[in-house]
Image (tube, helix red, strand yellow):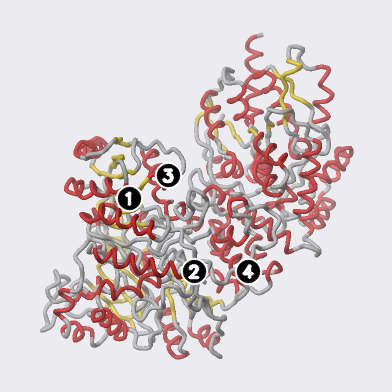
Amino acid sequence: MAEQHRPTAEAPAGFAAALRSAVRGASDFGPTARALTTMDASNYRRVPLGVLAPRDADDIAAALTVCQEYGVPVVARGGGTSIAGQATGTGLVLDLTRHLRAILDLDPAARTATVQPGVILDDLRAAAAPHGLTFGPDPSTHSRCTLGGMIGNNSCGAHSVAWGTTADNVRGLSVVRYGGEALRLEQGAPRRGGGRGPEGVRERTALGSGGVRAKATLGPEGVRELVDAHLALLRTGYPDLPRRISGYALDALLPEHPGGPDPVRAFCGSEGTLAVVTEATVRLVEAPRARALAVLGYADESAAAEAAPGLLPYGPLTVEGMAADLVREPAGLPRGAAWLFVETGGATPAEAKAHAERILRAADAVDGAIVTDPAGQRALWRIREDASGTATRMPDGSEAWPGWEDCAVPPAQLGSYLRDFRSLLAQHDLRGTPYGHFGDGCIHVRIDFDLLTSAGVARFRRFSEELADLVVAHGGSLSGEHGDGQARAELLPRMYGEELVALFGAFKDLWDPDGGLNPGMLARPAPLDTNLRFAVLPRRPVDVEFGYPQDGGDFAGAVRRCVGVAKCRTEAAPGAGVMCPSFRATGEEAHSTRGRARLLHEMLAGEVITDGWRSTEVRDALDLCLSCKGCRSDCPVGVDMATYKAEFLHHHYRGRLRPAAHYAMGRLPQWLRLAAPFARPLNALARVRPLAALAKRLAGIAPERTIPVLATETYSRWLRGRQGRGPRTLSSDRVVHLWADTFTEHLSPQVGRAAVRVLEEATGRRVLPPPSGVCCGLTYVSTGQLDRARAVMRRTLDRIGLLPGHPLVVLEPSCAATLRTDLPELLPDDPRAAELAGSVRTLAQYLEEYAPDWTPPRLDRPVVGQTHCHQHAVLGDAAERRLRERMGLTGELSGGCCGLAGNFGFEKGHWEVSVACAEEQLLPAVRGSEPGTELLADGFSCRTQLDRLAGRRARHLAEVIAEGLDGEEGAGR
């Protein structure tokens, strides 16, 4: 196998100091910054020397000057979602997302916008939306990809059949070359002989966002002569297809190009190898006021592919395709084994629907449906947008990887190409799930390459070479959207021939004679089987505590789940989703799910982060992880950072002194049991401020927090005392097991009392008193005290006494999630753990299953509040939604996380992030609610946070139902 990685290099002497003195932006040469940028969303890994967050164009120019002086290569990085390796580098990484995020101008009349390279696509679209405009290209990463990255890769997205590629939508660029020279590129560059392009400008001086002045030009000196010397080759060497992204678009510089030579188009798709973009003027298009979605079912993907070109004359906005092996759960799709998503637009919903109906009638589909409801459309598009993540795991759980993510063929060739592609997969004993932009002939696919062994990597190379030949045989392009990067650039001679590829090298040298910009990409590329990110991981499974059943018990396999699609980096509120609240609070990559996964990857690699489980870099990044479990459900590949954090903390503090909060809140169940007999005096002492402040300091609790009030009568004590006084009509042989979690038992027993009232009324069954000494182990797990957690769980299994066939009703969502997931994953060899996990039900789930004919009280009032993040991630809230609807409780609960998240928000140093998380969705929803609105929160943490920050008492659904029952009885009397 070819060499996979080299030892980490050191920055040249004096380079860091020279850089810091030349720029205003912050630079970081520490292990955390470097580890966070070793990878993008590809199979590749390159270790940089450091990271710079330039503040403006002047900073970029200064940095490129210093880098040239010291011979340090540079890679510009946006959202880091490139899937061919082009957002990784061995020198200085320019993080353009930190400061260069301004929309400098938006001109609705001219339908243009001028932006800095770090602008997130969705931010531009949001700014343009009030004017009825949008930016046409829309890759599935639209919520986190940047305009600079889109220009570098010539990104496209689902709507390219209507609005084209990024290159079709860029009007002008301000760029800086390696060494600091600024240039201005504009559509319709000056022609030979003093002619004027469409802009009516022969030579123009532009002022960039940072004050760098540049002249409009065709490019560096010598570009015109290079083109003129190779006119015949440039005129005949490029295939004619809508998604030809591979290589440099030198044909855009031909004199007969519409409007004259177009240096902007030639620059787009250059993957950061020519210059760094500092400013871009882009075209905006009119956004349809209404949209409809025709979903067409076909017998197989080839049939869908063959049908796609016939729909283009009807003027759709999208023609997207996918097969059944990408759909893991029922999604309301029409009959078929493959589908086309054909979006239409109109001035009114009726017009958009009529357009979709015409397409449905014209399509020769097995079945079809028209979706006009925006929520229904979003749900279907979510399947498609998450495909870059979900496709990385095959239905049997095995891994699949990018590398041949987006080759494109003429649309008329797509059906035959897919059949040949499937045949080639079978010849190599490989599997993949094709999907993508069928209307443009562009196919995405993740393939189950074995990139961990020499034999597997050799097969990866053989397959890549043969697939490149297959694409070319069908008249296609190796890249149809995401660029060549390291994954495909080596194979460009098979597509273009050696002579044209040599011309690419000459073009690169004119722009970057020192070879300092993103070396190893496009021109003189690195071999496609080097720098693979898996090569540095340990070959033997790491000794861990959790079972990781979805990853074969391998912690490295669990960490490999993160492929870098960066859905966790979405900055806007995620609607009903949760992931990733700490990133949205801080905006720091280290506090995203992807960032933490990258640090764990580098911890296992041992090159950049060298202290293994003792790493302070990983510890600090995980410190602000709320263990909300949002990533377990919201991450397209199911990264479970809460589990990884618990695993890390267990090893990090093994045999060492832990933070005070781990002893105080991590062992909360035992302290509360000891404190129960003394609840009244302890509550009184907690109201004495100096004593409370001292207690919080000793316990590692944030000084801003209030110590919760202890129940003077626990739930268990109340229930046992009630046994002789309960309703005589209850069945003695039909019973309910109701879990007495720590929070219900000691801090909110009114929730347990309400649940008993509801369960007895709805089922006629007797609620059994809970056994003593049982605990789910939640607080031990969240603080990484896994030995203790396992002991507590075993004791619970010994004492639970669950009757066969009887479910266990759990009121606290975090405890329910722990029993459902952490219990069997920490005790994988104990069959009782899986049995208990399978018995867990929420109150609404139990009522729906065991009292389906019961009519709950009708309350008819609006509700506000939050679905607990653990319930969202592990248990789902469908039953709760249906129950609320039956009760007339109207309105949606907020997504996100309340920010308290068990011990997290109580710990010293977490107050600001905790409040920021609550302010994202929950608190604004509460403040904006009407008088009389019911405030719902099933989690003790959520109720505590609302009480502290909003001054409002929230209630568990059980309390609301019980009050309704009491009201009905009162009305009956």
Q: Quadrant of the C terminus?
A: top right
Give how far across and how far down residue 615 sits, in percent. Answer: 68, 69
Q: Nearer the viewer, mark 2 or mark 1?
A: 2
- Are the residues at dot 4 and dot 1 in contact (C-beta closer than 8 Å)? no
Q: Residue 865 falls in which quadrant of the image? A: top right
Which residue in the protein does label 4 denote? 603
Numbered label attached to residue 130: 1
Classify residue 747 as left or right of residue 70: right
The residue shown at (38%, 84%) is 178
Kindly identify which residue carries mark 3. 327
Q: Position of residue 552 (x, y in %)?
A: 60, 54
Q: Residue at x 53, y 36 (%)?
A: 929
Residue at which label 2 appears: 455
Q: Earlier in the sequence, mark 4 or mark 1?
A: 1
Image quadrant where residue 512 sits? bottom left
Sequence-wise first label, 3 or 2: 3
What amino acid type should be assigned to the residue bearing mark 4?
Met
Q: Earlier in the sequence, mark 3 or mark 1?
A: 1
Q: Position of residue 539 (x, y in %)?
A: 61, 68
Q: CB of mark 3 within 8 Å of CB of mark 1?
A: no
Which one is in front in this view, the residue at disc 3 or the one at disc 2?
Answer: 2
* Local secondary structure at mark 4: helix
